[in-house]
Amino acid sequence: MAGAIIENMSTKKLCIVGGILLVFQIIAFLVGGLIAPGPTTAVSYMSVKCVDARKNHHKTKWLMPWGPNQCDKIRDIEEAIPREIEANDIVFSVHIPLPSMEMSPWFQFMLLILQLDIAFKLNNQIRENAEVSMDVSLAYRDDAFGEWTEMAHERVPRKLKCTFTSPKTPEHEGRYYECDVLPFMEIGSVAHKFYLLNIRLPVNEKKKINVGIGEIKDIRLVGIHQNGGFTKVWFAMKTFLTPSIFIIMVWYWRRITMMSRPPVLLEKVIFALGISMTFINIPVEWFSIGFDWTWMLLFGDIRQGIFYAMLLSFWIIFCGEHMMDQHERNHIAGYWKQVGPIAVGSFCLFIFDMCERGVQLTNPFYSIWTTDVGTELAMAFIIVAGICLCLYFLFLCFMVFQVFRNISGKQSSLPAMSKVRRLHYEGLIFRFKFLMLITLACAAMTVIFFIVSQVTEGHWKWGGVTVQVNSAFFTGIYGMWNLYVFALMFLYAPSHKNYGEDQSNGDLGVHSGEELQLTTTITHVDGPTEIYKLTRKEAQE
């Protein structure tokens, strides 16, 4: 009676396999912690106030904050009054990156966060639900002395959320409001060396544009991009893991097709999990170094969503196919109640991502959170996805409890078996429970390392050694799920070792009736593991 490799493998060999996987897991964490730099870098930019005295501001003119062709600048807003400079003539200019530096495609993405410095004035206070409207132009160039090429030009509205902690009295004029940072821009590739932002705050009292927003003194930006060194380590990991998972996936399916029976649902789901892991591993990011593919962030989100949806579905089906009181197995339709919330939640998150990063493909300044309708819509998608996730985990916990309870109940029949037979099935049950605990440990490690990466400063120091915690989290968890899928396909592949051929029933001291009770199944639904067969027999009885 051939089963899965995990059931026919000796404890010694199983420990060796586990030890090898553990070594690779440690290496995955060390690669991120000791070799890779931090995942991202944040750079602060202070805008320079340029003067554009042209009558027609609609004609494009790029104002540089520094360099040989720098603009006519003012130090502060007060300087504009004696020079009779109007608010519409002031342009806040930001050059990315800082002087004597260049951007690189290895940075992968660029995210900008906006911080407004707003002074309190009795005659110009921030009104309730105030909205600042910015006219923003984005340009790029690859030559330090070349012409700028326009990349985007949009009107960017942002709602102000500011508080003034001091009493609003004349002696406190000039103090700054405490304002929340605002999302400003996100682009999915950094294909050019230099970027330039020109930000205008047009004032139109008749249309109530930029009226009642206080006195804006300065505009500060924080740019966040991926570190080039981390990108290279990440690409190297994906390049190494892609053929590893692909080869084990081909090997796994080949062993299944060699069986005399058609593949069962659990085997198909494990194979689909391998496909989704291979899909997320394929290092298409290499092309982003040479091509301006701004959709890479959205594509990466879709790949991750497919993998996690497949992983959650696998856990449900894995438990369901091993439940002894589950009569309708080996059919995906039997799991619609459990898989349904996964599909609905995944669809909601996909729509949310399309509404955010999908629109950013044409308008990098867009954010769904900047309007009341967009915020309500985004929260609705997230809440529905959260409810679906909670329902899923309730179903999963209930099914895991049933599996462990039923297997424990079946153990009461083991004493009636011969000693060798009893030890054989006790080993199978132990290994099944062990795999369930390993799954729980992987999920727990993902949550724990995520929390640790959020509450720590990003790195730990022991003597002269610096460990990048955030990088170790990314590479370690990514490697862990690859090893998990690799182990599933290896251990649950059909074994060529036939238990009945190795030792006869007489050698084991097993009576023919006992053998029939434990192994007889309907041929066309014969399962991949002996635990599967054991539980199916119970359901049939």
Image (spheres, rainbow, N blue to C red):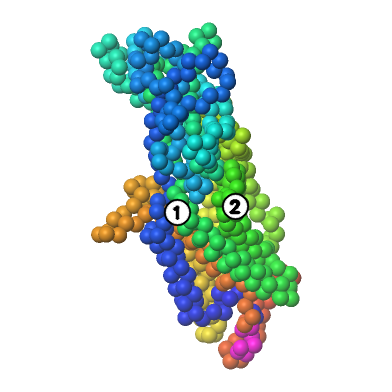
Magenta region: 498-504
Q: Position of residue 412 (x, y in %)?
A: 52, 73
What residue is rendered at 47% in x and 77% in y?
Answer: 16
Kind of residue at disc 2:
Phe
In the foreground, 185 or 423: 185
In the foreground, 24 or 389: 24
In the foreground, 430 or 147: 147
Residue 210 is at least partly visible in this image:
no
The N terminus, quarter of image: bottom right
Q: Position of residue 396 (x, y in %)?
A: 55, 54
Disc 1: which residue: 230
> Does the magenta segment cover residue 146?
no
Q: Residue furthest bottom?
A: 507
Q: Position of residue 347 (x, y in %)?
A: 63, 43
What residue is rendered at 45% in x and 33% in y?
Answer: 95
Quarter occupied by residue 73 = top left
What residue is rendered at 41% in x and 9% in y?
Answer: 84
Within-10-Å neighbours for mark 2: few <14, some 14–19, many 20+: few
Kind of residue at disc 1:
Phe
The circle on residue 287 is: 2
SS class, disc 1: helix
Question: Is label 2 in contact with label 1 (beta carbons under 8 Å)?
Answer: no
